[in-house]
Image: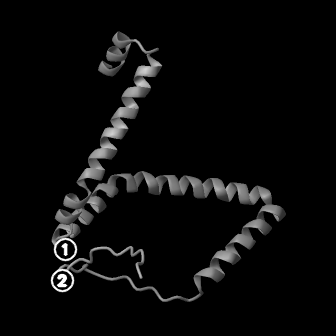
Amino acid sequence: MYQFALSMISPIENDSLKPLWLLDFPNIIANDKIVFSIIILGFISSKLCAEVAIGLACKLEAFVAKILRLLIYIIPLFIMGFIVKLQFDEVLDIIIKNYMFIFVTIIFAQFGYIFLAYFILSNCRVKEFIASLSK
């Protein structure tokens, strides 16, 4: 009779907004086989040669930290590109119109929580609360 449907608004199909290139890599080995073999290899290498595994882990951690430091500056470009795509697909106006109440409610809840935390941490004294907000 009645069913719960999680249907979403589909964007209008447009062929004019396409990426400049598509990277299509062939699948040499299935993903599940690679994941399970790496997990098993990780357990075996940590038991047999722990010093080498720890040294390799430290080098990989430094490499990943450098990549993340670079990506922090690129993330706003991805966000702006996503917003441009939503606007191009004519979905951004629909999202803002349909979910504005939820956005505003979340904003008020967050600021209310922050103000309550500052008020409690200032021992419920109004002068200290206002002074802590002004800092």
Q: Residue furthest right?
A: 48
Q: Residues within 10 Å of mark 1 (few under 14, many from 20)?
A: some
Taking 10 as reference, is 88 left or right? left
Helix, strand or loop at mark 2: loop
Vertical position of residue 62 compared to residue 1: above or below: above
Vertical position of residue 40 compared to residue 127: above or below: below
Q: Residues within 10 Å of mark 2 (few under 14, many from 20)?
A: few
Taking 43 as reference, is 6 left or right? left
Vertical position of residue 70 compared to residue 36: above or below: above
Q: Which residue is mark 2?
A: 14
Helix, strand or loop at mark 1: loop
Q: Which residue is mark 1?
A: 89
Q: Amino acid at mark 1?
A: Asp
**Residue occupying image coordinates x 61% and y 56%:** 59
**Residue occupying image coordinates x 70% and y 70%:** 39
Cα distance between the residues tagged 1 and 2: 8 Å
Q: Amino acid at mark 2?
A: Asn
Q: Position of residue 40 (x, y in %)?
A: 75, 72
Q: Nearer the viewer, residue 1 or 29?
A: 1
Taking 77 as reference, is 25 left or right? right
